[in-house]
C-alpha cells in the first residue's frame, strides 16, 4: 500500500492511526511538510516503518520554485502555517515569521508512483487548487482526503471547491464529507 500525506503537522492524527493499524501492508509512506520541525517529528513518530518512510521538507503548490513560507512567530509546528500570508493572519496570528522553502508541484511527487492507495492533503488554503492541477490521467489514488474549508480563501469554499467536486466526480470519485472541514473522495 502506497500512502502520501502532504501537510503532516505534528503527526497526531487519523493518518498516524491508520498507518499504525496497517503498518504490515504499507509499502511506501511519503510524508511532506514545509515546516522542518514537522518533518523531524514525522521521522521520529513513523520510525517503526523503517525504509518504507520517506520524509521530505518542502511545500506543495501549483507553481514550482522557492517561496516564502509563513508561520506564527514562536510556533514551529503551527497547523495554520502556509505559503499564503493572509491565511495565517486570518487565523488570528498577528506576529508572523517566514523562511524560504522549495516548492514542488504535486505532479512532481506523484510521478515516482505507479499506484497510490491513499492521498491525504492539508496545506492550508491550497488543497483545492493543488488537486485541481493533479494529473488524474496519469494516476488515480483510490482514496483522497483533503481539507475543503479554505478552498476559496480563509474560511471560504465556493468556485474552487465546486470545480474540484466536479472534477473528482468526472474522473470516477464518490465524495462524502468527513467532519467539518474535510472531504473524502473514493474511486467507485
Image (tube, grey):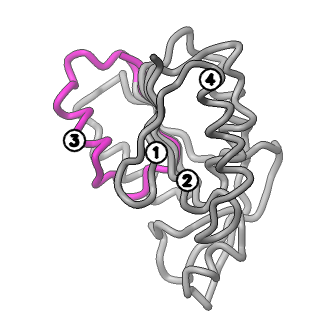
Which residue matches tag 3? 17
Q: Nearer the viewer, mark 2 or mark 3?
A: 2
Packing grade of label 4 (10 A; few <14, some 14-19, many >=20) is some
Packing grade of label 2 (10 A; few <14, some 14-19, many >=20) is many
Which residue matches tag 4? 110
From mark 2 to mark 4, how far is it between C-alphas? 21 Å
Tell me if residue 140 comes above or below residue 125 in the rendering: above
- Image location of residue 134, percent across then percent down: 69, 30
Name, please, the residue furthest toward the top. 114
Looking at the picture, tell me which residue is in the foreground, 78 or 119.
119
Which residue matches tag 2? 148
Residue at left 66%, top 38%? 131
Tell me which segment is drawn in magenta.
Answer: 1-28
Looking at the picture, tell me which residue is in the foreground, 69 or 14.
14
Q: How many marks?
A: 4
Label 1 near label 4: C-beta < 8 Å?
Answer: no
Q: Secondary structure at mark 2?
A: loop
Q: Nearer the viewer, mark 2 or mark 4?
A: 2
Looking at the picture, tell me which residue is in the foreground, 97 or 160.
160
Of the 4 image quadrants, the one containing the N terminus is top left
- Which label sits on residue 75? none
Which residue matches tag 1? 183
From mark 3 to mark 1, how far is it between C-alphas? 18 Å
- Image location of residue 183, percent across then percent down: 46, 45
From mark 2 to mark 3, how far is it between C-alphas? 22 Å
Q: Secondary structure at mark 3?
A: helix
From mark 3 to mark 4, how far is it between C-alphas? 23 Å
Question: In terms of sequence position, does the residue under pointer 3 or pointer 1 come before the other?
Answer: 3
Packing grade of label 1 (10 A; few <14, some 14-19, many >=20) is some
Question: In terms of sequence position, does the residue under pointer 2 or pointer 1 come before the other?
Answer: 2
Label 1 near label 2: C-beta < 8 Å?
Answer: yes
Amino acid at each position: 500500500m502506497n500512502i502520501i500525506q502532504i501537510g503532516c503537522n505534528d503527526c497526531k492524527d487519523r493518518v498516524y492511526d491508520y498507518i499504525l493499524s496497517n503498518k504490515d501492508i504499507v509499502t511506501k509512506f511519503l510524508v511532506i511538510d514545509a515546516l522542518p520541525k514537522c518533518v523531524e517529528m514525522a521521522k521520529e513518530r513513523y520510525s517503526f516503518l523503517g525504509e518504507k518512510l520517506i520524509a521530505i521538507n518542502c511545500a506543495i503548490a501549483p507553481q514550482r520554485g522557492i517561496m516564502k513560507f509563513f508561520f506564527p512567530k514562536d510556533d514551529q509546528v503551527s497547523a495554520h502555517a502556509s505559503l499564503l500570508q493572509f491565511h495565517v493572519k486570518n487565523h488570528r496570528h498577528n506576529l508572523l515569521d517566514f523562511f524560504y522553502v522549495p516548492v514542488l508541484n504535486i505532479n512532481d511527487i506523484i510521478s515516482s508512483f505507479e499506484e497510490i492507495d491513499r492521498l491525504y492533503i492539508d496545506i492550508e488554503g491550497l488543497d483545492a487548487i493543488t488537486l485541481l492541477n493533479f494529473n488524474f490521467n496519469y494516476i488515480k489514488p483510490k482514496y483522497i482526503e483533503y481539507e475543503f474549508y479554505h478552498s476559496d480563501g480563509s474560511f471560504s469554499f465556493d468556485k474552487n471547491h465546486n470545480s474540484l467536486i466536479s472534477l473528482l466526480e468526472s474522473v470516477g470519485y464518490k465524495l462524502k464529507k468527513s467532519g467539518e472541514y474535510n472531504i473524502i473522495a473514493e474511486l467507485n
